[in-house]
Amino acid sequence: MDVLFLLDGRVGEWSAWAMALTRAAPAEEGRSRWAGPRDASARVALRHDGERLYLAIDVTDDAVRSGPVADEEYDGDGILVWVNGEAGEFDDDPYLAVPFPAEDGPVEVVVTDGDWEAIATATEAWAVRTETGWSAELAIPLSALEGGVEAGGAIRLNFALVDSDEAGAPGDVIYWRPEWESEWDAAGFGVVLLRR
């Protein structure tokens, strides 16, 4: 297998940014502190090599903080990734949580459901600080995904950016495809075709 690029969290070699996360979900219980795209926003790019799905996340964030981002305890910045979830079941699907680490380098991918432990263990992730926030790269083996996915097939995806500017204050969440059960209700997943 040819290596497409070095997996190191730096996203300078990525050029086709297909998705943007630029608008926070409606405030829950008055907790939103999001002040606009310069406060927190992201763009996401995808590639595959027939064996792995690669994700690049380029985040603009005015206050980068490390901390946990799993199980809705958002006490740090990070990204949440839903991969191949069941259509119409977004709120019940487990996801991969990638917290921004205290130091640049590899990141431990956390899951919210034991069934996804194999996916999290097989996924490689790196994150680094940048001049405008932080960036991350992930490599998810296609063979680890539910139902298996091959080149030419399709993957259901969703992403969320977690922005936590202050310790003890709940973080805001910015979805690529809006959260279920919100005033922005929409289909829970986007579909990405893996072209050969």
Image: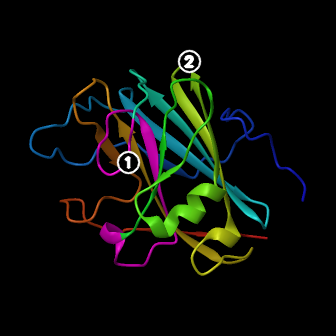
- Relative to 24, residue 71 above or below: below
Label 2 environment density (alpha carbons within 10 Å; few <14, some 14–19, many ≥20): few
Dominant secondary structure of the residues highlighted in magenta in the image: loop
Residue at x-position 27% and y-position 65%: 180
Residue 70: mark in rendering: 1
Res 190 seen here: no
Q: Is residue 189 left or right of residue 126?
A: left
Q: Say which quarter of the image contains residue 145.
A: bottom right
Q: Say which quarter of the image contains residue 144.
A: bottom right
Residue 68 percent location from the top left of the image: 39, 38
Query: In the image, which is nearer the foreground, mark 2 or mark 1?
Result: 1
Residue 131: mark in rendering: 2
Q: Earlier in the sequence, mark 2 or mark 1?
A: 1
Most extreme residue toward the top, as rendered? 131
| Residue range highlighted in magenta | 68-92
Residue at x-position 57% and y-position 33%: 135
